[in-house]
Image: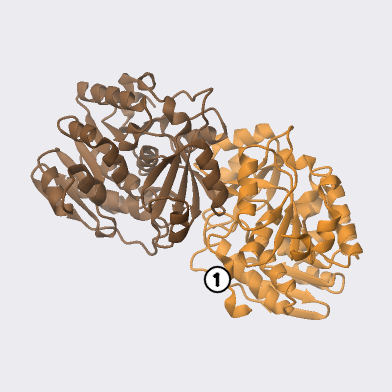
Chain colours: A orange, B brown
Amino acid sequence: MSAAQIDVVGIGNAIVDVLSHAEDHALAALGLAKGAMTLIDAADADRLYDKVGSAVEASGGSAANTIAGLASLGGRGAYVGKVRDDVLGRIFAHDLKALGVHFETAPASDGPGTARCLVLVSPDAQRTMATYLGACVSLGPDDVDANLIAAAKATYLEGYLWDPPLAKEAFRKAIGAARGAGRKVALSLSDAFCVDRYRDEFLGLIDGQVDVLFANETELISLFQARDFDDALQQARGRVPMAALTRSAHGSVVLAGNEVHVIDAAPVARVVDTTGAGDLYAAGFLFGLTRDLPPATCGRLGSVAAAEIISHIGARPEVALSTLVAHLL
Amino acid sequence: MSAAQIDVVGIGNAIVDVLSHAEDHALAALGLAKGAMTLIDAADADRLYDKVGSAVEASGGSAANTIAGLASLGGRGAYVGKVRDDVLGRIFAHDLKALGVHFETAPASDGPGTARCLVLVSPDAQRTMATYLGACVSLGPDDVDANLIAAAKATYLEGYLWDPPLAKEAFRKAIGAARGAGRKVALSLSDAFCVDRYRDEFLGLIDGQVDVLFANETELISLFQARDFDDALQQARGRVPMAALTRSAHGSVVLAGNEVHVIDAAPVARVVDTTGAGDLYAAGFLFGLTRDLPPATCGRLGSVAAAEIISHIGARPEVALSTLVAHLL
């Protein structure tokens, strides 16, 4: 595909998920904050892995999940992220390319291996993550092709990119290229603890650099250090052109200029694993946005994509999402 | 665990599954026989992988799935199989040990990598497999600890072991050790094409070497080159002390001496992926057998374990099977 055909280019930490189950007391014993993403080093990754139950491996990474979802909906996606030239790196690349995603970031040929995220799913379907960033730490501005960014209708950035040291330079270069070309910039806040680590920088970004903000309740509350969701929502209004704020089973609220749309969650027979719910909501939303669909429709597309992903283990769709959204298009 | 505490030791090809979806026309284009297991070399494994959709990786291997299922039911399992000391080999070992399975086969430190099986799931939930045996080719009799075999109530062997050249020697050594200690020997026929490759040797085994035979309809018909299932069943009667013959949605038939038990399949809300159905049926059956439960109960335990595995992607249980069988114990 040529760059001119791209709807959304995502930039993020390229990660393979290791998905297992854990009771709440096991999470506590492992020292992990339930529902959050904790950064760990290689030794801790091995140590934790030895302590968890049997697992399944699947490509992950927040923005990569979003782009995979966009492609599954029929959108044209590109992705920038750093793996190593190892087994997990080949798995990660395969799973994006098999969906038709443009993914040409050169893998690292030395240094740490491809990033792994230990995803522990609780009986209540909540997920808790421990991430070893591995090769992601070598993603830098040289990996961002300004022409690719300029040619895509929207650039989607995950807040997690603030963790590896060089990636924020890639992040800033991408924002500059997108804005310079008159393209949209979307940012996901990723995680409440991540917001806590980089609050001032994220606030600086949403003031004038970001067109669409994705956040869940706790992330938005953390960003504004607000009393509650309603307080945070009022602070977001008018500060970003568009915001898609997810509330788990309570659906989402879409802010678009002065408009406020309250969107229901799509029905799910049984919630199995919430891993990737926010990522897939963003996939649906961006799919609609890059087709110039109304904000409420974008939110409904997000709800349907999120409903599919939480109905099974893992953060990549098990069915072609395009088959689930025809009624909304 | 000491060897004396083992219910079943399984010996098989130690494989990591790469699970993806494929329509029937795609299977034909890839040159794969639907429902069968085709052996491929490393180059073909890479070539096929490049052509299939996004995938999920999970530990597999027929006998390993059975022992994992046995452990999930609360049984005490051991496994013998050969991986390499690589990423996939560590995944395979982790997923058995995390279930409490005794798995101490030394990984290969050189030669081919850990075996991979490309599992393509059709829209009708049937699975088609292409296996690269990798490190499995170096499993040999030295990997079989006769004391371990002698101390386990039953030894379970997969017919697939006939494919790698040295493994049949391991297989024969295990049978000798088990029989010498007065333990039970169970054999799974694995695959109709596999039966076709080794029919005479398998017939030689079931005449006096095997106490429990596991086969599905097509495998049993192939073994005896019979007209139909009923013809094959009559040939099996009296030739092996016990046989558990699976018939997909039609349940199973258990032969025990002169007894014939017809067992219904357990209900499944939606059949998603039949990968591992036979393996998990064997897990349930062997769990019952090593607890001296009646043959029909063994069959019902098999049905329940199989029903769980076909309700989701992959051949390892997503829930503790012990929670599903209390009504049968």
Nearest the camera: A238 or A71?
A71
Give the x, y percent position of residue B126.
38, 56
Give the x, y percent position of residue A317.
57, 60
Q: Is residue A50 left or right of residue A116?
A: left
Q: Is residue B15 left or right of residue A244?
A: left
Give the x, y percent position of residue A252.
68, 71
Q: Is residue A41 positioned above or below B215 on the image? A: above
Q: Amino acid at mark 1?
A: Thr
Nearest the camera: B251 or A278?
B251
Q: Quadrant of residue B66?
A: top left
Q: Is residue A167 positioned above or below A72 on the image? A: above
Q: Residue shown at 70%/45% (left/top)? A: A38
Q: Residue shown at 44%/35% (left/top)? A: B133
Q: Does the rendering let one see residue A89?
A: yes
Q: Does the rendering let one see residue A22?
A: no
Q: Residue shown at 29%/34% (left/top)? A: B156
Q: Is residue A315 left or right of residue B195?
A: right
Q: Quadrant of residue B189?
A: top left
The chain ID associated with circle 1 is A
Quadrant position of the N terminus of chain B in the picture: top left
